[in-house]
Image: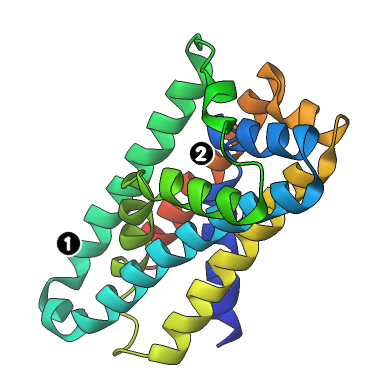
Amino acid sequence: MTGAFLAGLVAGYGVAIPVGAIAVLILGLSARTSFRVGAAAAFGVATADGLYAAVAALGGAAVAGLIAPVAGPLRLSAALVLLALAGHGAWRALRPRVATGAAGVRRGMDTPVRAFAGVLALTLLNPATVVYFAALVLGRTDRAGPDPLAAGLFVLGAFVASASWQLLIAGGGSLVGRVLTGPRGRLVTALLSSAIIAALAVAMLLSG
């Protein structure tokens, strides 16, 4: 059971640490309003990541028995999806970036409730997150039958990882926050995320 929680933690950090427009938005909300508003936005991101992890984990558990005959090819396909996500993340980090208009999105998110709801909606618009979690979960379904408790711990780990990282950005203020959301910080965190995802893919391949 502890392994499922740790797997969720690693997976959660893998998807959370790339610093993009949402992280800049959270930092800006904290600086312009208060930490309470920034923290609410951070939990909006974590909730979206947790929901996507739940969809992937519970869906993977539900079809585990059906896909057992093709577990080997499935694990290979899942690993290739993860490697593709890692490569795409690294490519996006290394190519020249155009500044985004995060300032305009901030308007209307000046209370904790609005910040939570607004950032939750924005994060849910990224379907690549559920593809990422699904690849991780479905690539491991040959290990055992459906286990709701393990799935729940995986989701909890993903939520804790996402929440802790986003709260770090929200509470980092002008020191940690600006370092993480600057050009170099974005590059380092994106490459770190790609390395984590690639390592998960390689581990999946070697476990076969």
Residue 61 can be seen, yes or no:
yes
User: The disc labelled 1 sits on which kind of residue?
Assistant: Pro
Residue 76 or residue 65, whichever sits in front: 65
Callout 1 secondary element = helix
Residue 174 or residue 90, whichever sits in front: 174
Q: Residue at 80% across / 48% down in the picture?
A: 35
Q: How is the image coloured?
A: rainbow
Q: What whole-number distance in Å separates the C-alpha atoms at marks 1 and 2? A: 23 Å
Rendered image quadrant of residue 61: bottom left
Q: Which residue is mark 1?
A: 73
User: The disc labelled 2 sits on which kind of residue?
Assistant: Ser
Q: Residue at 71% across / 46% down in the picture?
A: 38
Rendered image quadrant of residue 173: top right
Q: How many marks?
A: 2
Q: Earlier in the sequence, mark 1 or mark 2?
A: 1
Give the percent coordinates (x, y) of residue 97.
51, 12
- Which residue appears farthest toward the right when viewing the image? 175
User: Do callouts 1 and 2 mark residues in contact (Cβ within 8 Å)?
Assistant: no
Q: Which mark is residue 194?
A: 2
Does residue 22 appear left or right of residue 72 in this picture?
Answer: right
